[in-house]
Image (cartoon, grey):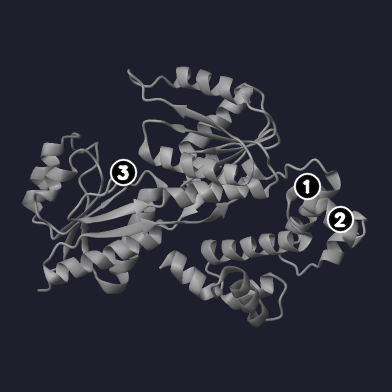
């Protein structure tokens, strides 16, 4: 009788990050396995007692473990099993770690808001959380390198358990004090939803006065918000797949491998909370709106100028003054982002995407995309997904 490897998954499934990692692991198992997966019985069947978890692990005689970092991780390390730990603040030596590129997340959020024309920026996060501090540092550095100031709200570590009402009052005062309009990044989607609800209490309009983006793209949290929240998507599925591939090597070699797997941001999932253009020039705003509405068509600079009733030269000058980019640059940016969304969020073929973008076939799209990103559409998709 064939014995399948027993892999224990101590990863919560209530968050998008954990679900994405598990999606990638499951995909690897379907293609290369199968493996047998074991999850500790849920809270309504077992008390939350870590000693019981360790006892269960020993009795199971597992072949490998994938778990979220917590204060008990070193107890599991002592079992000397092939092991992968995710969501670590500091990498644990001697084992495989899944880490997140927090710097790239902060930079992507900042660039998204800058591209929308904002000149005032804010970051809301938590001083006692390392990944929040890293995202804040990168966000503010990117904003300042573009010549703008960044206002920070970093809730300090509480001496007593956090009070949601007290925190909301502090955030509310901070939001009301910000110069408007402002582009704001929250450290994650939960924080972004909290900020959005606080804006409602202060009758601050989102996105007109405060445009908000979160991070991690927890779709349920983002869609529960009103207006729905924009967020930074992560390639957790790819990281999960790579983690499973690494686990397979450890199982085959009977050897624990110290390694790092990195979760990278892929793109901004733009929803209503940043669906705005923060430019004072109404003509430029109309031109940008036209470009976005026609993102799936091959439009020229002349088309845009005609749509707003100005000469090409006059609109070009006003564009550069308002947002620091040319009309052509904006058309390219919007179309490339549209292609990226279809590559990452759908299973459309390159030919189907090309037709949807107004091309007669895939050749022109491939050349266009490769010139702007340095990769072919298929290579880009493969790098993001698996």
Q: In this view, does 282 lie to the left or right of 364?
A: right
Q: Is residue 280 above or below residue 385?
A: above
The answer to whether the residue labelled 3 contacts the one labelled 2, judged by CB atoms less than 8 Å apart, is no
Q: Nearer the viewer, residue 61 or 372?
A: 372
Residue position marked by numbered label 3 in the rendering = 89
What is the number of the mark on residue 322?
1
Give the CA separation, mark 3 to mark 2: 48 Å
Q: Quadrant of residue 47?
A: top left
Q: Residue at x 46, y 65 (%)?
A: 384
Give the CA separation, mark 3 to mark 1: 40 Å
Q: The N terminus lies in which quarter of the figure? A: bottom left
Q: The C terminus lies in which quarter of the figure? A: bottom left
Give the CA separation, mark 1 to mark 2: 10 Å
Name the N-terminal-most of marks 1 and 2. 2
Mark 1 residue crowding within 10 angstroms, few (<14) / some (14–19) / many (20+): some
Residue 227 can be seen in this image: yes
Name the N-terminal-most of marks 3 and 2. 3
């Amino acid at each position: 009788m064939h014995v399948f490897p027993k892999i224990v998954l101590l990863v919560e499934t209530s968050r998008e990050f954990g679900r994405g990692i598990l999606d990638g692991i499951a995909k690897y198992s379907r293609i290369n396995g199968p493996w047998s997966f074991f999850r500790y019985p849920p809270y309504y069947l077992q008390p939350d007692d870590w000693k019981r978890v360790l006892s269960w692990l020993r009795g199971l005689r597992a072949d490998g473990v994938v778990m979220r970092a917590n204060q008990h991780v070193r107890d599991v390390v002592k079992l000397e099993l092939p092991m992968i730990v995710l969501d670590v603040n500091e990498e644990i030596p001697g084992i495989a770690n899944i880490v997140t590129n927090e710097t790239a997340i902060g930079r992507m959020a900042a660039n998204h808001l800058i591209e929308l024309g904002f000149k005032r920026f804010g970051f809301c996060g938590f001083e006692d959380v390392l990944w929040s501090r890293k995202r804040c540092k990168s966000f503010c550095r990117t904003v300042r390198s573009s010549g703008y100031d960044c206002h920070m709200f970093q809730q300090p570590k509480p001496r007593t358990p956090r009070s949601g009402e007290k925190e909301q009052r502090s955030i509310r005062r901070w939001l009301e004090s910000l110069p408007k309009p402002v582009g704001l990044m929250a450290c994650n989607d939960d924080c972004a939803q909290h900020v959005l609800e606080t804006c409602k209490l202060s009758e601050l309009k989102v996105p007109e006065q405060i445009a908000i983006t979160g991070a991690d793209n927890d779709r349920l949290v983002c869609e529960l918000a009103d207006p729905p929240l924009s967020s930074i998507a992560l390639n957790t599925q790819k990281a999960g797949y790579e983690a499973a591939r690494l686990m397979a090597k450890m199982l085959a070699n009977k050897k624990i491998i110290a390694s790092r797997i990195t979760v990278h941001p892929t793109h901004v999932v733009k929803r209503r909370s940043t669906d705005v253009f923060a430019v004072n020039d109404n003509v430029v705003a109309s031109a940008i709106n036209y470009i976005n509405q026609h993102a799936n068509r091959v439009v020229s600079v002349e088309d845009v100028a005609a749509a707003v009733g100005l000469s090409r030269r006059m609109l070009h000058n006003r564009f550069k003054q308002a947002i620091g980019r040319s009309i052509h640059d904006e058309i390219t940016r919007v179309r490339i982002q549209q292609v990226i969304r279809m590559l990452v969020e759908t299973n459309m073929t390159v030919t189907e995407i090309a037709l949807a973008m107004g091309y007669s076939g895939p050749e022109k799209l491939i050349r266009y995309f490769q010139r702007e990103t340095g990769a072919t559409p298929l290579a880009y998709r493969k790098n993001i997904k698996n």
